[in-house]
Image (cartoon, rainbow, N blue to C red):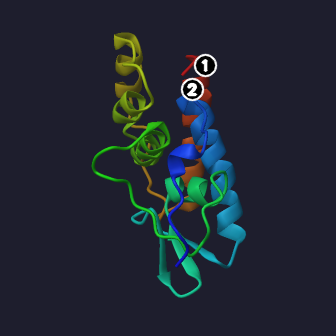
Amino acid sequence: MRSFKNVDECLLPDKLSDLIEVALKDLSKVEKNPRYVVDMGVWHDDMMEGVCHVCLAGAVLAGTCKLPHDQVWYPAVINFGSTTSKLIALDFARRGNLDAALRRMGPPPKREDIWFVQRKRWITKQYHIDPVMWREQMEQMVRELRERGL
């Protein structure tokens, strides 16, 4: 296995809507790559020789952050930086928990923004059940977050 790459050197967008958009683009790429399997329960793990299992955040690690497919990565419990925090925000967002996602993105969100994201059920179908509907819901999430400047 290759030496560990510090993912906190990878710069990711500061707005949640932009971050999700980057993640969806990276996910589209890994879905087409035979070296990857989308498994929303795994961050970035070479579970089978030559095949890396990734979640939405893992797709960003593979794409934007250029983490090699044979590199295992899970978030550290302590001492993580901005990029790791944003990857954790993506993990919350892909499940529809935008309250927790916004709180991971940086400065505390405004109360009205928390109320906005808590007002509806963002994700009704998870990726493993219906990837097409899940993606449509994520794209709608991006549009609505962007309208609020989030």
Q: Residue 48 at x, y = what percent? A: 49, 86
Residue 27: image quadrant is bottom right
Pointer 1 and pointer 2: residues touching (CB < 8 Å)?
yes
Q: Which residue is mark 1?
A: 147
Which residue type carries mark 1? Glu
Q: Which residue is mark 2?
A: 144
As drawn, the residue found furthest toward the left would be 77
Q: Residue at x 66, y 58 (%)?
A: 66
Q: Residue 128 at x, y = what percent? A: 47, 66
Q: Secondary structure at mark 2?
A: helix
Q: Is residue 122 left or right of residue 50?
A: left
Quick check: 139 above or below 44?
A: above
Residue in front for this viewpoint, 115 or 71: 71
Q: Residue at x 62, y 33 (%)?
A: 18
Q: Residue at x 38, y 11 (%)?
A: 112
As drawn, the residue found furthest toward the front would be 3
Q: Tell me if mark 1 has few (under 14), some (14-19) or many (20+) residues whose alpha carbon lies within 10 angstroms of its own.
A: few
Q: Tell me if mark 2 has few (under 14), some (14-19) or many (20+) residues whose alpha carbon lies within 10 angstroms of its own.
A: some
Residue in front for this viewpoint, 68 or 139: 68
Which residue type carries mark 2? Glu
